Amino acid sequence: MTVTVTAAGPLPPRTYDVVIVGAGVVGCALARELARHPRLSVALVEAQDDVGQGISKANTAILHTGFDAAPGTLEARLVREGYDRLGAYAAESGIPVERVGALLVAWDEEQLAALPRLTGKAERNGYHETRLLNPGELYAREPHLGPGALGALHVPGESIICPWTTTLAYATQAVRAGVHLHLNTQVTQVSWETDGHRLLTSRGPLLARRLVNAAGLHADIVDRLLGHEDFTVTPRRGQLLVYDKLARPLVRHILLPVPTALGKGVLVAPTVYGNVLLGPTAEDLDDKRATGSTADGLAGLRDKGRRILPALLDEEVTAVYAGLRAATGQEDYRIAAHPEHGYVTVGGIRSTGLTASMAIAAHVTGLLAGTGLDLGPGREPEPVTMPNLGEAFPRPYQRPELMAADPEYGTLVCHCERVSRGEIRDALATTIPPRTLEGLRRRTRARAGRCQGFYCGAAVRELFERGRA
Amino acid sequence: MTTSRSVDVLVVGAGPAGLAAAARLAAAGAGRVEVLEREQQAGGVPRHCAHGGFGTWTRPLTGPRYARLLTEAAERAGAVLRTGTTVLDWAGTGPDPAGGPACPGPAGPGARPVLTAVGPGGPETIEARAVVLATGARERPRTARLVPGTRPDGVYTTGELQQAVHLFGQDIGARAVVVGAEDVSYAAAATVRAAGAEVVALVTEHPRAQTGRARARSVRLCHGVPLLTDSTVAELLGRGRLSGVRVRHRDGRTAVLSCDTVVFTGDFVPDHELARRGGLTLDPGTRGPAVDGALHTSRPGVFAAGNVLHAVERAGTAAGEGAGAAGAVLDFLAGTRWPAPGLPLAVEAPLRWIAPNRITPAVPPARYVLRTSTPLTRPVLRIHQNGRLLHSERPSLGTVLPNRPLTLTARWTGGVDPEGGGVRVSLA
Ligand SMILES: Cc1cc2nc3c(=O)[nH]c(=O)nc-3n(C[C@H](O)[C@H](O)[C@H](O)COP(=O)(O)OP(=O)(O)OC[C@H]3O[C@@H](n4cnc5c(N)ncnc54)[C@H](O)[C@@H]3O)c2cc1C
């Protein structure tokens, strides 16, 4: 099968059966799901220069059990299903997942009183493994927790995952199975002409029999292009601090606050890369590009973090980032089919979209069939094996057999993250190669470590520029 | 297959400290002395400091030249330099599952340190009679300094900038703001100019530059580079590529400087990963391993030297420490017992740290190095133990600035009561 990934020039003059707008984790999961039906011609179009550049790249990277979803919602169902699906997929394709479990820590009597209610909610969501811990049990599990916690709810299934590898695995599999990926392609206009969509994009026109809007933060804008005014996406900014790998022994679980009306609150969690995450803030904004961090935001996080894990504050900060969640003012996803227009909106995929991605993809595929799209026969796609970025699994520099076969895996370039020249070379030769140093970082972790390039920045850039030339 | 070897002395890091230690050890017949360096070339940070300021007054050198001389000296003395080899960890150790510091491993006291390393030839474990950690220091990047804003390209530390320009000839943009006004900041500004770009301004939170007045004046007047004092970079702006930085003056006023590059200079921190992974006691002030005057760490057989002990001193100081550590390594190899941890040596504000920072009856250091957080005019340093004044000294007749070396003699160290409490250094 020839692989089609484009980033410039005119788009193919054909009519695709399905065009998916937005190559975030949801769009990529859907592309992968549709790729299981070889008779369909599918295109995935993305405004930015890489997959997973929107909400998908800057989240808290948790694989949720869905224990605290609003029972009975579509979100609750798809998160529960997605948890199992993505868990199995990760194991098979080498996406790092660590089943660390979560602790909802109660810091006052009111929060303590709320824990049994959360157990009840978890039960209604079909999750039966929660358990209440008294302070002794809690501190035995988390010896570095700040003083004064009154108890906790243990949710053993909550896990941490690598969001970039997930998105990339979906996209890679989709593209290898024949889906066309068109990057740098922003959809600016859509018109419906009896049996198909005519899209105007920054790279010219594109034709589609069915259209799926998985445009994340911009899903409302794309919806309006089609004349629907069902919802408005409010960007809710979440700023996060990533602490040094040397802080990793300080925390063993995802430490969650007891949820309040104001949202999920600030957590402390390990990452699969071996760092510790503190965040996110929750700020409703109106600028969908406001992914900057602020002095107030970071100071507020540090105040909260000091209470949860005081020793964390003495560690170095490795990275600071901010993501935007797609809030719609509703406690559920906004997934809707418009059969008369051959159109499905996948909007309002809030902070659970990573977990739910595969289940959303299956659900939306069903909706597409409901619009009269003939999916044709199905088959399992070729499995993918992703490079491992997780600390819990052997990285290339820890695999003697790899280094024996190819010394480039023993030649470390990025020292903080222990990324070898072999991995950088490989990333540049993948199905969906990085187009920027940032893209390379998400695929290899090169330059993502504590020195942020003091040692390796210039050398990594050299390899990148030479490898792409 | 993991290969296992044993050597007499293993030096980690081929910067000035490690190379000087290795040269002296090899010359003194310490047996097999091996230096492991993760970069492809030995020499450490001076490799990319393409400016003068190294060597001695009588023999001034550029950084690369200095790096080459040290490398050649170590090789000539018989030390084995292995570049492209990263020391990963201590064998048999690892972070304590309870989250405490790593423990010295199953072997117990008296056992030789064993390190794991990796290079193109694959993994190896190396047992050594003695280890010298000389892993150096790095500048805190923008993230660690918590500078808010967007995340555009064009954000550097001096280390990355110098490598980009001097080792790889990369384009670094057209207009750069340099954050900091200490020696390294002026070196960064020179590198920006060497790359054909313009320095928009130097920005420092301090009331004046922390370099010689002549240097500061020449950059300002001859090159027309303004120095913004009492100011911080409060926000980075721009998407894709940096478009400017917002600076905030102490009085609250802000302004945007338009630029496509920003260099965060100074604010050094020891590269102490191996020290921590090995469970070595760190000094809270320096954040490097705590060491006594002969550079013994808290772990038998393990010494440390150079900027991993204190960020950041000049290369000559680091090299001097390397040579000093070599002396103590030789004594240890000859059978001298590992000293007890000794008494802590601490500083009081506005002093920030002191190194070495433990006092044992073993040899005193050649001298102590310290830092202040505020300018000190004709400071008098006083050393107390249990309220008893041991010594006082005026180390400088001029003004000592933050981020500039301040040294203290060690001649009072013998007067410390080994049974007494901790020793404190304060200002008169
Ligand atoms: C931009 C800049 C300008 C400077 N200008 C001057 C100047 O003009 N004059 C002056 O005297 N000084 C200057 N200095 C300071 C001088 O460079 C340092 O004092 C000196 O390099 C310190 O030597 P070191 O051996 O302690 O550390 P480094 O030179 O940093 O060497 C440490 C070495 O250890 C290696 N290493 C670390 N961890 C491992 C591991 N796990 N495995 C293997 N290898 C490892 C590193 O790769 C590095 O090569 C400057 C520094 C900078 C950053």
Image (tube, coloured by chain):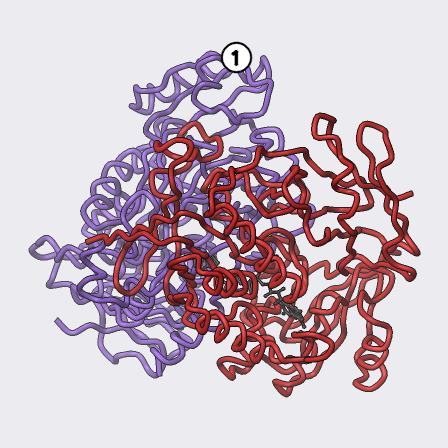
Chain colours: A purple, B red
Q: Mark 1 points at which residue?
A: A113
Residue drawn at (70%, 30%) of the image: B418
On the question of residue A68 being in view, the answer is yes
Residue A101 percent coordinates (x, y) = 37, 29
Dot 1 lies on which element?
Answer: helix
On the question of residue A340 being in view, the answer is no
Residue drawn at (67%, 84%) of the image: B193
Q: How many labels does the image show?
A: 1
Provide the chain ID for the residue under circle 1.
Answer: A
> Considering only vertical position in the picture, is B172 above or below B318?
below
The answer to which image quadrant residue B83 occupies is bottom left
Quadrant where the C terminus of chain B sits is top right
The amino acid beneath tag 1 is Ala
Residue B297 percent coordinates (x, y) = 55, 42
Residue drawn at (87%, 58%) of the image: B396
Residue A457 percent coordinates (x, y) = 49, 68
On screen, residue A278 versus residue A409, left or right, reads right
